[in-house]
Image (cartoon, grey):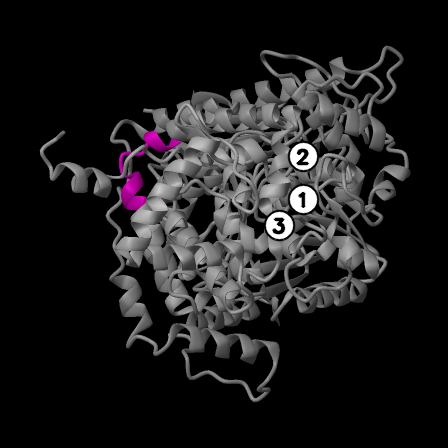
Amino acid sequence: MSAGRGDERPAMGTAREQILARIRAAVGTPGADVDAAYAALPREYLRAHHDRDIADLFAERAADYRAVVERVPESGLVYAIARVLTDRAAEVAAAATPDGQPVPDAPFVMPDAPFVVPDAPFVVPDAPFVVPAGLPAEWLAELPASIALASDTPPLSAAELDQMAGVVTGCAVAIAETGTIILDHGPGQGRRALTLVPDFHLVIVRSDQVAADLADAFARLDPGRPHTLISGPSATSDIELIRVEGVHGPRNLHVLLVAPSR
Amino acid sequence: MTPPETAGQHAGPATAGPHPETVGQHPAAGGPHPGMPTYLGMPSFPVAARTAVADSQLRRNLAHATHTIRAKRAGAVGELADWQELRAAAKAIKDHTLANLDTYLIRLEENVTRAGGHVHWAQDAAEANAIVAGLVRAAGADRVVKVKSMATQETGLNEALAADGIGALETDLAELIVQLGHDLPSHILVPAIHRNRAEIREIFRREMPDAPDDLTDEPRMLAAAARSHLRQAFLSAKVGVSGANFAIAETGSLVVVESEGNGRMCVTLPQTLISVVGIEKILPTWRDLEVFLALLPRSSTAERMNPYTSVWTGVTPGDGPSDFHLVLLDNGRTTALADQVGRQALRCIRCSACLNVCPVYERVGGHAYGSPYPGPIGAIISPQLRGVTSEVDASLPYASTLCGACYDVCPVAINIPEALVYLRGKVVDAKRDKHLSPERAVFGVSGRVLRSPRLLAAAQRAGYLGGRLVGRSGRIRRLPPPLSAWTETRDAPAPPRESFRAWWARTRGTGR
C-alpha cells in the first residue's frame, strides 16, 4: 500500500508537517490497519435500483432531462446519424440572414419555449461538425456531401471549436438509473473541450454500454482517465431554484441508443 | 464578434460594498485575516435577523425558493428505497476517513503527484491565498476564471487576489449575480437565492454592458445572457480556479459537480488549473463515488444526477490543463477534528438540504449568519472554524429552534441539533470566564431560591403579586428592564394565583 503514518519529510515545520501533526494530535492513536477498517465499512445499499430492461430505463431517464433520445437498430445507425446532422445543419442555416451573412450562434430551440438568443462568436450556416479521432468511419458513411466535417488533428483552438455546428462522439459507459452518459475521452470521444464548446452534441450509445446503476458504471471505468458525466444538456437551478436548460455547455444533447440488430 | 470589453469588464476586482439589503460589509473591507472572514461589523444573529425578517420581498423570495426545492428533494430521495443505507454508508466512510485523515492525505498527495500534479498545503486562508496568487503570477496571468467554490469563499480569495492586482471572474450564474450585484452570497448552492428573477434582470441590465436590450425576466433568457457574457472569458482564460466536491485518495482524482458547464470550462480550457480543497473533502477510493454521487445531486438540486460532473487525475497530455495545482486547506478544520462532537460537521458535502428545510433560514435568509456558510450547517461550522469570540459566532448556535429537520435531511447524517446544543455550552463556558452577565446573575439567584423552601415560597407569593401587575389575560407580554430581555422575544405565562405547595399546605391533598 502507499505511504502510511510513518512517512515524514525532512522539512519539519512546513505547513504540510504542521497540518499532519495537528491531525495526528486530533485523532489520537491510529487503528491497526486502515485498509482493513475501510473494507469492513457497512455498504448495505442496493447495487441497482431496478430490474427492468436497463436500455429502456436509460432512454426514459435521459429524456427526462431534456436530452433528445432516439432508439435505433444497428443497421439503421448510419442513416440516423446522417439525418440528425442534416437536421442540425438545416437549423443552423435557417437562422442565416437573407444576404447570407454569418448569423448569431445557432438557434437554441426548446420544445415548449422556442426562442433564439443572440450569441457570439457566430456560427456560419455551413459550419462543420467536429469529429474526434477514432470515431468509427462507417458511422459517417451515409452523410450527404453538404455536411462539412472538421478534424481535431492538429488540435482546434477553443475559438475554432466555438464555431463548429456540433460534435459527434461515442461514449464509455452510460447509467440507466440516472440517464447519465459518461465520456472517458478515449478514441471516438475526443479531448474534453470537443464535447464542451460546440453547442450541439450527438452521442452514440451502444446498449451494451448501459450500466444499471452507479456502482456498475464506476466499476467499468479507469480512474486514471479524465471523465465527464453528462445528464442532459447544460442547465441551471440558480434562478429561484427552478431548473432551466441552456447555459455554458452544449445546449442541445442528442442521443442515439443503438440496439444490436438480430 | 463579441466586443472586447466583455472579457475584461468584470474581470477586475469585485467592487466592495454592502448591498442596501445586506447587513454588514464585504469581507474585503476587513483587511487581511488569516482565517475565515467574518463579515465585518456583522451584528449578532438576532439583530441581523430582525432586519431580514422585516424585508418582506426577501421573505417572499426565500419562501418561494425553499418550498419549491423542498418538495422536489423529497421526491428525488423517495425514489431510492435504500436512502437510509446510502446515508449510513456515507457517514461511515466519512467518519473512517476523518479518523485516518493523515494517511489518506498522504496517499492523495502521492497519487496527484504521480499523475503530474503539484500539491501545496495551506494552514490558513492567508497561506492559501498567497499560494494561489503566486501561481497565477507564475502563469503570467492577471485574471482568473472561477467555478463556484465554498473553500475560496471561505478564504476570501477574490478579495486577496484583487489586492494583488489579479481579477477573479465568478462564472457560476448565481455567483455572477452576486458579484455583479455587489452583494454577498446567502446560500451554499444558490448564492443568489435571495434574488428573484425581476431583481436579477435589473442587475444584469445595470451591470452587464452586453446584456440584450430586450432582456426579459424569463429564466432562460437570463441564463442565455450569462452565456454570452462569459463566453469570451472562458475561451481566452489562462488560469482557472476551482474547488472540488471530492478528492479520491486512492487515485488522486478530483471531482467537480455542477450544472451549467462553467465548471467544465474552468477545469478544461485554461492551461493552468488551481484547485483549493478543504482537507475534509477526501474520499478513500474511487468506488466511494457510487455512494456520494447518489446522495449529493438528489439532496442539493433534487436531481437524479446533476447535468455535469468533471473528474480529472493530475494532467492528461493533450487534454485539458498542462499545469495542475492542488492546494490542501486546513483553516480551522484540524481544530474541529479534535472536537469529538464538533468533528461530525466535517462530514458535510455542502449539499444545502439543511438550509432548504430550515424554518429559521427560510425566514431570515443567509446574510444574517455572517459567514460564507449560512443556515443550520453554517451555525455549527462557522463557530468551529472561527471560534466563539465574535458576537455573531457566539450567537450562531442559538440561531435554531432545534426542530431537527436539518438532521433528518442530511445525507451524511450530521446531528446538527446535537452539535448546536453542544456549541451553546461552549459559548456559555467562554462567557463564564469573562464577566457576570445578567443571565448568569439570574440563574445564580434562581439556584439559591430553588434550594431553599422558605425563599421559594416567598418568591412564589411575590411572583403572583408581580404577575397581577404586569400580566393580562394570563400572559405577561412585557417586563421592565433588565427582565425585558426575556419578554422582547416571547410571552411568559402569568404566575398562578396559588402555587402547588401553597395549595397542598392549605388542603393536604383533599382537593378543596
Q: Nearer the viewer, residue B428 or A43?
A: B428
Instruction: Please state which amino acid type lies under the numbered disc 3.
Output: Ser
- Give how far apart the Cα atoms at labels 3 and 1 are: 28 Å
Instruction: Please state which amino acid type lies under the numbered disc 1.
Output: Met
How far across and down, in percent of the image, does residue A220 sit?
A: 38, 49
Identified at 63% across, 44% down, the residue is: B263
- Give how far apart the Cα atoms at labels 3 and 2 are: 29 Å
Identified at 71% across, 19% down, the residue is: B217
Per the rendered image, the range of residues in magenta is B76-86
Q: Which residue is mark 3?
A: B371
Q: Which residue is mark 2?
A: A248
Residue B79 in magenta stretch = yes
Identified at 33% across, 44% down, the residue is: B460
Figure quadrant of the N terminus of chain B: top right
Q: Which residue is mark 1?
A: B265
How far across and down, in percent of the image, does residue B330 sit?
A: 56, 66
Task: Assign the magenta stretch its main secondary structure.
Answer: helix
Q: Is residue B384 left or right of residue B269?
A: left
- Report which quarter residue B447 is drawn in: bottom left
How far across and down, in percent of the image, does residue A214 sit?
A: 37, 42
Q: Tell me the element at label 3.
A: loop
Figure quadrant of the C terminus of chain B: top left
Tell me the mark number nearer the camera, choosing from 3 and 1. 3
